[in-house]
């Protein structure tokens, strides 16, 4: 059985149909020109709609979709924070307790003098001789003040080590810095001389913190001028 033959198209006749069109009477046009014109008008309307209306709307839709994704990410992040809020509060309380414990290791202004006495006694208790014990000028930091003390001690290397251990066991924070140990030129018993900077710290009281804050604000205002 043979397949039905496709109808042949006479392109010359189609061309004559377009050439003989009467623009005053579109209803009388042949089928091919009418269909061609309708498709052309449809495509023109479609392109015009895309260019003047839909393109901006699609850009706006794309921007809103990106904003939606960003909001979803923010929601997930905030949800995680909300779920872990109790844990964060617990960690914050632990940090506050740790900070409070460290702060208690810093003496206040009235306790610095007794701390210096403790440092002196720690050296004398190990049989060390203080040739120099000279507190320097305080250096004020964020919430504490640093007090350097230049010391020079005479004794044995073992006694210096024991003294450093005793300093580390004090209830307040004291550090030994810039340590230099040399032979004692004035001694024949093999003693040594230790030069160091002993630093102790104290926390600033409320009045000092307020004065520091006020000075910083005035300096900031002066800089703006």
Image: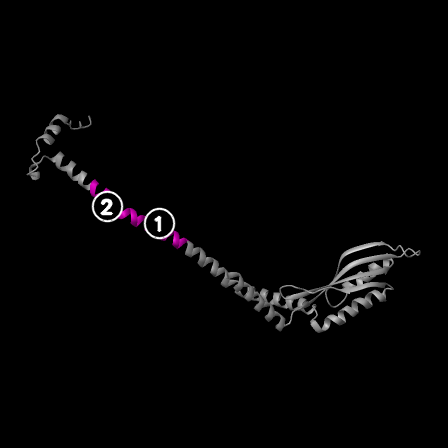
Q: Quick one: label 1 or label 2, which is nearer the N terminus?
A: 2
Residue 40 drawn above or below residue 91 = above
Q: Position of residue 98 (x, y in %)?
A: 65, 66
Say if residue 92 shows up in the picture.
yes
Pick the quarter of the image with the N terminus.
Answer: top left
> What span is in magenta?
43-69
Residue 57 drawn above or below residue 28 = below
Q: Position of residue 108 (x, y in %)?
A: 69, 71
10 Å neighbourhood of mark 2: few (<14), some, or many (≥20)? few
Q: Which residue is mark 1?
A: 62
Element assignment for label 2: helix
Element assignment for label 1: helix
Q: Residue 159 occupies which quadrant of the picture?
A: bottom right
Q: Residue 4 occupies which quadrant of the picture?
A: top left
Residue in the image at 86% along x and 60% along y: 154
Q: Position of residue 60 (x, y in %)?
A: 33, 51
Residue 182 drawn above or below residue 118 = above
What label sits on residue 49 in the rendered view? Answer: 2
Residue in the image at 83% along x and 59% along y: 160
Q: Nearer the viewer, residue 20 or 223?
A: 223
């Amino acid at each position: 059985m043979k397949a039905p033959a496709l109808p042949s198209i006479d392109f010359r006749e189609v061309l004559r149909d377009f050439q003989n069109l009467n623009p005053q009477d579109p209803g009388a046009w042949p089928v091919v020109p009418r269909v061609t014109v309708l498709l052309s008008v449809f495509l023109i309307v479609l392109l015009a709609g895309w260019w003047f209306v839909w393109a901006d709307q699609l850009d706006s839709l794309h921007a809103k979709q990106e904003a939606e994704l960003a909001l979803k990410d923010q929601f997930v992040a905030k949800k995680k924070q909300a779920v872990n809020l109790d844990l964060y509060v617990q960690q914050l309380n632990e940090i506050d307790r740790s900070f409070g414990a460290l702060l208690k290791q810093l003496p206040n202004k009235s306790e610095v003098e007794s701390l210096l006495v403790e440092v002196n006694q720690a050296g004398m208790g190990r049989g060390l001789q203080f040739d120099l014990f000279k507190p320097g000028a305080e250096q004020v930091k964020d919430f504490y003040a640093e007090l350097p003390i230049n010391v020079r001690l005479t004794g044995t290397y073992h006694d210096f080590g024991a003294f450093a251990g005793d300093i580390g066991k004090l209830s307040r924070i004291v550090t030994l810095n810039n340590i230099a140990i040399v032979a004692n030129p004035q001694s024949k018993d093999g003693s040594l001389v230790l030069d160091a900077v002993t630093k102790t710290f104290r926390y600033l009281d409320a009045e000092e913190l307020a004065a520091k804050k006020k000075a910083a604000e005035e300096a900031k205002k002066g800089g703006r001028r």
